[in-house]
C-alpha cells in the first residue's frame, strides 16, 4: 500500500539525520512555553491599554466591535434563558434577526460561557480579542511541530500566520475573522487522512467536528478554507496521480464520516441560514466590491504597517484599513523565495508553494488589478463569484490562507536549512549543534525581516463602552419592554446595544445593527422604518449622519406621530443620551408627547411605563 508523503519529516522527537536526540522533552516543553508566552505578550501589546479584565472600554473604534461583543454575549444569555442562540428578538423589533446569517459565532459564545460567571460581556469580548492572534499563532506552531518542523522554525511560521497583516487588519473589530486556531488543525487532519496516519474513523470524526466548529465561528472563513483545501488536494492528486485511485478508496471512509458528522450537526444552522425566520436572500456584499488584493498591495506596506521602507502605493482599492491585509512585502517574499528554491526538491515545500500561489491568485479577485488599475484580465475567482454559496466571499480575506502557506514555506525552509547543515557535518562531533547554529542564524534573519517589514501600528484603537448608570438601569420597567433609543441603534450608532448587553438584555430595541431583510427581501444593515413614518426620520435627522436627509422640525404633528408609534409598537421605554448631537430637540418632543422623563440625569433621560404603552 502506497503512502502519500506530504511532509518528508521525522515525526517522533527532534532528531538529526543520524537519529541522535538533540533535545529532551523538558527542554522542548520549556521552549514551547516560551513561544506561547511570547505570542501572548504580542496579543496584549496589540490592544494595550485595553486589558482582559477591562469593562469600560472595548477594542476597536467602530460599530463592528460592538456587534461582535453583542453576538458573543447573546449565546450564554440565550442558553441561560432557554432562548434560540441562532435567533433573537432583542433587536430590530418587531421582526427580530436571524443570527445564523450574521457573524454571530455561537461557537465562540459557547467557549466564553464559563467566563460569564466572573467577567462581564465587554470584558469577555476583550479577552477573546486579545487571545485571538496568540491562539492562531499557537495552533500553527503546534501543527508545524506535529509535522516534524524544528521548534525555532515552527515558532517563526506561527508568528507569520497568527500575526499576519490580514489578522492585524481584522483585529480592528472583526473577532470572528481573526480568531483562526481551527484552520491549522483542519490542515493537519486532512494531511493525516491523505497519509493514512491514524484510525480512519477517528480522523473522520475529528475533521467533521473541526468543520462544525469553524462554520459556527465564521462560515466565510470555513468557505475559503474549504476552497484552498480542495486546491491542495488537487495538487496532491496531480503529483501522485499514479496512486490516486488507491488513495481515494483509502481516504473515502474518513471523508464520508466527516461529511456525516458535519451534516448532522450543521443541519439546523444551515436551515436557519437559508430558510429560517427573517432570513434574507442575495448576498450581503455586492458581487462587484472593492475588497480584493491589487498586485501592488502585496508588495507595498498598507496603512497598518509602521515601516514603509520608502515604498508607497496609494492606489490599493481598499478604503477600509481592516481589509488591507494582503501585504507580504518584497523583503519577506525574497527570503521565502530563497528558502523555497533551496528546498525545491522537497515535496512538502512544493505543495506549500503551489497552494500559496493558488491562494494569492484567488485573493486578487475576479479581475487582475495592478497599481490601482483594473486590467479586465479574468482570474479564477470570477468563477467562484457566480457560484451559489460562494458569491458572498470577499477575495481579500483569502489573504488568511496566503499567510498560512507563507508561514509554512518559511518554517519548512528554515527546518531544511538546519537539517542540511547537520547532514553536511554528520561525520563530525557536534553536527547537530552546527545545524542548530546555521538554522538559528537563518531563523533570526527571517524574523528580523518579518518584524521590520510587518511591524503594525499598535496599539489598536479602543472606544468607551459604558453601560447605563444604576439609577437609570434600575428604572427599566420589567417584562422586557420594547424600547426606542436615541441615537437609534444602527451600524452608525451602536451605543444602545452596549446599554442593552450591560443591562442583561432586559429591554428590546426597535433599531439594531445586524444583516436582515429589507422590504424586498434583500439584506440590509440599517433598521426598518418605524410605522407610521415620521418619528424615525426626525431622530435620524437629529443624528445628522446623512447630509441628504433634511432635518424634520419639531411640530404638533411630530408629537402626535410619536404617540402613535409608541401605541402601535407597544413601546414602554424611551432612552435618550443627552450628550449625542440633537438630543435637546429629542427630549423636547418626547416630553411633549409623554410628559417629563421618569429619570433624568446629566447624561440620560428615561421614560418608562409598567402598565402598557407610553
Image (cartoon, rainbow, N blue to C red):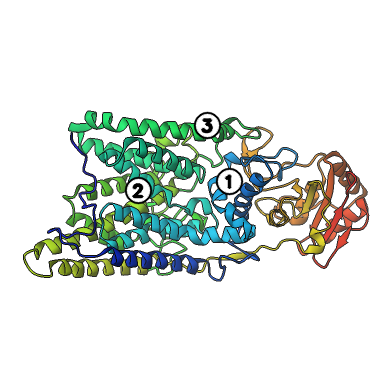
Q: Which residue is mark 3?
A: 267
Q: Residue at x 82, y 47 (%)?
A: 535
Q: Which residue is mark 1?
A: 104
Q: Is residue 439 above or below residue 253?
A: below
Visible in this render: residue 336? Answer: yes
Mark 3 → mark 2, Cα distance in angstroms: 32 Å
Image quarter hosting the N terminus: top left
Q: Residue at x 25, y 40 (%)?
A: 195
21 sits to left or right of 153: left
Q: Is residue 98 above or below residue 539?
A: above
- Report crowding for label 3: few under 14, some 14 to 19, many 20 or more residues within 10 A (C-alpha): few
Mark 1 → mark 3, Cα distance in angstroms: 17 Å
- Report crowding for label 1: few under 14, some 14 to 19, many 20 or more residues within 10 A (C-alpha): many
- Report crowding for label 2: few under 14, some 14 to 19, many 20 or more residues within 10 A (C-alpha): many
Q: Which residue is mark 2?
A: 360
Instruction: Give the label, 1 or 3, closer to the camera.
Output: 3
- In the image, residue 252 lies at what x, y percent? 32, 30
Mark 2 → mark 1, Cα distance in angstroms: 28 Å
519 sits to left or right of 123: right
Q: Are marks 1 and 3 in contact (CB under 8 Å)?
A: no
Tell me which corner region of the image, top left, top right, bottom left or bottom right, holds residue 450: bottom left
- In the image, residue 184 lies at what x, y percent? 37, 49
- First in sequence: mark 1 vs mark 3: 1
403 sits to left or right of 281: left
- Foreground residue among 511 and 370: 511
Amino acid at each position: 500500500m502506497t503512502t502519500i508523503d506530504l511532509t518528508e519529516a521525522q515525526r517522533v522527537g527532534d532528531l538529526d539525520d543520524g537519529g541522535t536526540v538533540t533535545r529532551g522533552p523538558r527542554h522542548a516543553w520549556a521552549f514551547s512555553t516560551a513561544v506561547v508566552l511570547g505570542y501572548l505578550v504580542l496579543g496584549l501589546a496589540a490592544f494595550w491599554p485595553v486589558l482582559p479584565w477591562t469593562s469600560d472600554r472595548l477594542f476597536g473604534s467602530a460599530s463592528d466591535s460592538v456587534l461582535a461583543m453583542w453576538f458573543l454575549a447573546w449565546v450564554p444569555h440565550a442558553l441561560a434563558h432557554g432562548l434560540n442562540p441562532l435567533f433573537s428578538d432583542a433587536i430590530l423589533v418587531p421582526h427580530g434577526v436571524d443570527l445564523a446569517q450574521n457573524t454571530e459565532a455561537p461557537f465562540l459564545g459557547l467557549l466564553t460561557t464559563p467566563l460569564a460567571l466572573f467577567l462581564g460581556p465587554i470584558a469577555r469580548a476583550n479577552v477573546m480579542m486579545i487571545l485571538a492572534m496568540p491562539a492562531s499563532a499557537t495552533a500553527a506552531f503546534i501543527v508545524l511541530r506535529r509535522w516534524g518542523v524544528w521548534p525555532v522554525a515552527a515558532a517563526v511560521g506561527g508568528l507569520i500566520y497568527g500575526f499576519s497583516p490580514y489578522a492585524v487588519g481584522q483585529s480592528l473589530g472583526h473577532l470572528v475573522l481573526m480568531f483562526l486556531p481551527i484552520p491549522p488543525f483542519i490542515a493537519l487532519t486532512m494531511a493525516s487522512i491523505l497519509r493514512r496516519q491514524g484510525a480512519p474513523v477517528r480522523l473522520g470524526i475529528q475533521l467533521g467536528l473541526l468543520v462544525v466548529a469553524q462554520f459556527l465561528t465564521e462560515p466565510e472563513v470555513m468557505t475559503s478554507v474549504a476552497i484552498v483545501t480542495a486546491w491542495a488536494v488537487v495538487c496532491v492528486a496531480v503529483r501522485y496521480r499514479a496512486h490516486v485511485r488507491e488513495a481515494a478508496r483509502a481516504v473515502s471512509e474518513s471523508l464520508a464520516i466527516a461529511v456525516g458528522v458535519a451534516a448532522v450537526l450543521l443541519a439546523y444552522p444551515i436551515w436557519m441560514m437559508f430558510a429560517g425566520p427573517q432570513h434574507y436572500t442575495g448576498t450581503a456584499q455586492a458581487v462587484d466590491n472593492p475588497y480584493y488584493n491589487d498586485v501592488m498591495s502585496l508588495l507595498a506596506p498598507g496603512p497598518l504597517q509602521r515601516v514603509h521602507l520608502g515604498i508607497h502605493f496609494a492606489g490599493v482599492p481598499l478604503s477600509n484599513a481592516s481589509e488591507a491585509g494582503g501585504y507580504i512585502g518584497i523583503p519577506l517574499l525574497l527570503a521565502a523565495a530563497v528558502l523555497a528554491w533551496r528546498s525545491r526538491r522537497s515535496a512538502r515545500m512544493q505543495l506549500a508553494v503551489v497552494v500559496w500561489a493558488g491562494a494569492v491568485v484567488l485573493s486578487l479577485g475576479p479581475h487582475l488589478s495592478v497599481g490601482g488599475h483594473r486590467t479586465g484580465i479574468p482570474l479564477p475567482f470570477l468563477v467562484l463569484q457566480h457560484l451559489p454559496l460562494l458569491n458572498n466571499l470577499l477575495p481579500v480575506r483569502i489573504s488568511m490562507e496566503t499567510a498560512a502557506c507563507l508561514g509554512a514555506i518559511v518554517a519548512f525552509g528554515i527546518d531544511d536549512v538546519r537539517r542540511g547543515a547537520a547532514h553536511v557535518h554528520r561525520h563530525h562531533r557536534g553536527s547537530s549543534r552546527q545545524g542548530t547554529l546555521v538554522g538559528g542564524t537563518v531563523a533570526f534573519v527571517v524574523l528580523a525581516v518579518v518584524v521590520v517589514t510587518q511591524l503594525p501600528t499598535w496599539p489598536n484603537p479602543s472606544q468607551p463602552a459604558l453601560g447605563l448608570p444604576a439609577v437609570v438601569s434600575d428604572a427599566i420597567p420589567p417584562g422586557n419592554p420594547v424600547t426606542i433609543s436615541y441615537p437609534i441603534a444602527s451600524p452608525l450608532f451602536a451605543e444602545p446595544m452596549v446599554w442593552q448587553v450591560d443591562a442583561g438584555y432586559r429591554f428590546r430595541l426597535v433599531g439594531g445593527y445586524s444583516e436582515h431583510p429589507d422590504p424586498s427581501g434583500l439584506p440590509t444593515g440599517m433598521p426598518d422604518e418605524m410605522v407610521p413614518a415620521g418619528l424615525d426620520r426626525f431622530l435620524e435627522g437629529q443624528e445628522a449622519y446623512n447630509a441628504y436627509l433634511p432635518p424634520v422640525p419639531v411640530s404638533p404633528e411630530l408629537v402626535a406621530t410619536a404617540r402613535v408609534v409608541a401605541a402601535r409598537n407597544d413601546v414602554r421605554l424611551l432612552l435618550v443620551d443627552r450628550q449625542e448631537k440633537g438630543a435637546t430637540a429629542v427630549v423636547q418632543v418626547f416630553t411633549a408627547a409623554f410628559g417629563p422623563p421618569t429619570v433624568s440625569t446629566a447624561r440620560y433621560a428615561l421614560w418608562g411605563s409598567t402598565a402598557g404603552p407610553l
